Each structure stands twice: as C-alpha cells, then as structure tokens.
Amino acid sequence: MAVKNRSILLISDFTVSGLAPFLRREIPVEVAPFDQVASVLLDPSQAAWREEPNLALVWTRPDGVVRSFGRLLRGEDVSLDQLLEETEQFIEQLTMAADRVEHLFVASWTVPPYVRGLGLLSLDPERGHAHHLLRMNLRLMELARENPKVSILDSGRWLAHAGVAGCNPKLWHMGKIAFGPAVMAQAGADVVGAICAIEGRTRKVVVVDLDDTLWGGIVGDEGWEKLRLGGHSPIGEGFAAFQSELKALQRRGVLLAIVSKNTEEVALEAIDRHPEMVLQRDDFVAWRINWSDKAQNIRDLAEELNLGLDSFVFIDDHPAERARVRAALPAVFVPDWPDDKLLYAQALTELTCFDPATLTAEDRARSEMYRAEQQRNKVQDSAQTVEAYLESLQLRVTAERLNASNLSRAVQLLNKTNQMNLATRRMTEAQFDAIHTDRCPVFVFRVADRFGEYGLTGLASITVNGNTATVTDFVVSCRVMGRGVEEAMLHVITQFAGRVGANKVEATYLPTDRNAPIKAFCDKNLGTPSSSADDHTSYSWSTAGPTWLAQHIQLDWDLAQ
C-alpha cells in the first residue's frame, strides 16, 4: 500500500541516491545536496526544504559528522568526553531539523565490517572504537526518548544482513557510495515500515494455514501423533521456531487466526494434544477450519473480528492458495513464502508490516480482549433484548484528561480508527500532545465490563471559545460501538462545556469512504444538522439540552483534575 500524503527528504554525508528507488514506489523522495548535512539541518531556507517535506531521514557516517571519531579510527588519542561533546552538537542540529517535519528518522551510526580497530581491544572502555560508538549511539537513542518526533533506525542490522559486500571501499573512492544495494534495500524496507507504523497502518492479524505451515505433515492423513513438530529433527525444530515467532508477535498485540482446509475436530485435537505445540488453542482469537474457499473464510474472519481486510496477513505454504487470496482479497497482504521449512521463522521476522510505533498495555492484552469479546457475543446471542444484553454487561466508562501515561494509546486510537472518527485526523504523538491545552482539552475514555477491560477506546478534543465549545475529534473504537459508550462521551463533553461557561456545543463531520457509521450516530443523537455540504455536515446543540448518559452505564469522571 502506498504511503499517502507524505514526502521524505534524505539528508546524508555520502551518496544516498541509491536509497531513493526503494522508497519511490511508496513515497515521493527528495535528496538534499551531497555532504551538506550541517547546513541543511540548521538552515530552513536551504533549497532542500522548499518542497516542505513531511518527513526526513538523516543517515550519516560517524566519522563524517563527529570528526573526533575519524581521528580515533586513525589511531589518535581521543577521549570519550570529546566524542560525546561533538555528538551533543550534532543532536542539537537534529533537534532543530525535527521542528520542521512531522517526524525525523535518524539511522544509527555504524562502521564498515572490515574495520577491525584494535581487534581484541575494540570494546575497551578507554580506547576501543566499538565501545565509543556504542556510547555515541546510546546518546542518539536518548534523543528519541526525549523527543517523540525522532526515531532511531537500526542501520547495524542493514549491514549485518548484507554482509561484507554491503560496504565496498572501491565504491567509496569512486563515487562516495558508502553502502551497496543490499544495504539500501534493507534500509528502504525499514523506512517504509516505520512510516506505516507512525501512521497507524501496521497489520493487526496473522492468518495461518495448518498443514505444512504451522506443523509438518497432513494431520487428516497421518494423525496428530506423526506430525513433524519440535523434537530433535531439523524440520520439527523449524516449525517449533516458527510457532515461537508467532507467539512473540501475539505478545506484542498481533492477533493470531487460522484458515485451513481440514476437519475442524481433527485439527483442534492436534493443537490440544500434540506435546510440542508452542501455540495453544487460546492463542488464536478465531479460526475457520473447513473445506471452504480460504478467501471467503478470511472475509468471514474480518467480519467476526470487526476489522478491515487491510489489517490481515495471510501465510500459507501452498502457492495456489496464496495466489487465490491475493487475487480475491487485494487488501490482504500475502507474503511470498519459502519452500524450505527451516526458513519459516526467518521469513516471518523479516516482515516489516507488524512494526509498531509504540507498544502499550492495550497492545499486549489485545488477544485477551478479543476472547472477552467472544464471551460477550455468546451472552448477546442468548439475551432476549438488546437492552437486557447491555444491562448484563455492567459497563463502566472512565473519563480522564490526556496525559503522558495515556498519550501513546490515544494517538494509536486516533490514527487507526476509521468508522467512528469525526474528523479522521492523523497526527504524531508530539502533534497531538501540542494541541492539548486548558482552552483545547483532550479527553480519553476507558471502558470495562464484567468480562474484562476494553482499554482506552474513546477520545474527544474540544476547543472552548467564549460561549461555544467545538468538538474537533470524536473517536470511538469499533470494539465498543453501539453499547452506549458514544452517548456517555457526549454526556461528558456537554457537561464539561457547561461547566466552563459555554452554552452551545458544535461538531463538524468530515466524510471519508469509511466513517459513515459516525454520521449515522450524529444524525440519530444530534438532530438536524445546522449546515450540510458534500465535504462536511455540522451539528449544534445546547449544554442545557438532553443528557445522553445511558441508564446501564456507570460513569466515573472528574475533568477538573
């Protein structure tokens, strides 16, 4: 999927144009003048900034911008304090550049793999170049922690993947080319993955086949006892390693599901009884194990999980099944898959589509949240009325102001939610945090019920101007749609507006191809629009008007804090 409404400026002290082809398929690229790093970072009037890029990547050689490090590599005596002082000067330049873009990516510093330095003493704390470079990179990482607009990319992995051929001194002398195409390919993949991450476009679900994908063999023919999984065979170890990597993804919030052509009871018996299974039945939030078309099964899973197909990744060992899903469901990402079973774990870990921008408590608990949702669905199926079902949930909504502890999750919700999103604004953490002031507060809403926590599932931003309060953002997770949470949020907004002296509240719906549900909600709850056009619909209501708090919701809020 192409990166929309984005452009990126590449700033480097070597010939970085070789990276551009790996990025242009996804995002427009501008390349700053060669070896003008300091002037480009410091001077906003430079020609490189005229196109007003949204993003920038700074990729430099440590000896190119920290001159003392070059002296260290040449055998001169250089103290760590001097190196860190020059590092701080470079960080000041990066900070100034970060103010001009939505996000600044900085490649960590590396040296060519053929540079041995002092060999045995390369990691010596007093004079080892490798030790000192680690300390310099650590300071770059601290910058990223201090400034949410800055992210550090691990260029060491790019070089390690390319091997010795990644750096060729002949190319440097001939064209100031520091890194070869293999390094550029890895860098390009990571940069695109990073952009998708900060935009909230990471994939959320891995759908896996079973036979010869999750384990070796055909369970329906051979029985679960003879499957190749774990043990001391290379093939069995390879499948166990693949399952371990899937488990690692699940621990950071990626949902696991199964689509397999099999007899369900036979396949589930294998999952439950095989002693070498790393993944258990509870690790999967849903499955379709039958003899139906896999593309249709994935559609059914998307509907069950209430997620778009662009959230899905499909992994299958069979080329024909992969081709079928690619053709039928182009929004689903279907990676090429190796024939060699021993490479499955590596193939999974090399995917960039799961790269997170942040990792929150809600992410880690996502599988448990979906299992709780399945319990709710069972109760809903048995309930006589919708009202009885909602009453049985014992919903609790807690409202609080935006703060450092909930900022990351709030921005995730803002960037990932499409259906119940009034303005569909996409922002970085720094941008969203900056709009939160006393006259423009941002409120977040946490939801729980008797089955467990939904987590932070709603947010609203309000601008108070005289006697009018304007709702800019009104965002609700699809996981709590239709349960009265939206009405509770309206209640909080309206009550708060009245407390600060406003007698009227306004909201404007900006349509997209995916947020029709919030338009329907506004029409139902806010009455006749005050104005309407193709590109917006505006609503207005009085703070003395009706309360929207549903009877079945327990609300906890004190926004004066």
Image (cartoon, rainbow, N blue to C red):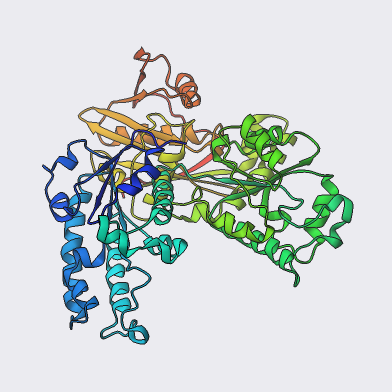
From the viewer's perspective, is residue 304 above or below residue 38?
above
Residue depicted at 62% across the width and 37% down the height: 391
Residue depicted at 28% across the width and 26% down the height: 503
Q: Nearer the viewer, residue 386 or 150?
A: 150
Q: Nearer the viewer, residue 139 or 456?
A: 139
Give the quadrant of residue 119. Answer: bottom left
Count of numbered circles in the view: 0
Please indicate, yes or no, whether residue 402 appears anywhere in the rendered image: no
From the viewer's perspective, is residue 400 above or below residue 498?
below
Q: Nearer the viewer, residue 560 or 410?
A: 410
Residue depicted at 73% across the width and 31% down the height: 384
Please indicate, yes or no, whether residue 383 appears anywhere in the rendered image: yes
Q: Position of residue 349 (x, y in %)?
A: 55, 57
Q: Nearer the viewer, residue 363 or 542?
A: 363
Q: Position of residue 523 (x, y in %)?
A: 46, 19
Horizontal relation, residue 85 to residue 508: left or right = left
Q: Position of residue 420 (x, y in %)?
A: 47, 31
Horizontal relation, residue 500 to residue 253: left or right = left
Q: Position of residue 229 (x, y in %)?
A: 75, 63
From the viewer's perspective, is residue 318 above or below residue 303?
below
Residue depicted at 55% across the width and 34% down the height: 331
From the viewer's perspective, is residue 374 above or below residue 5?
below
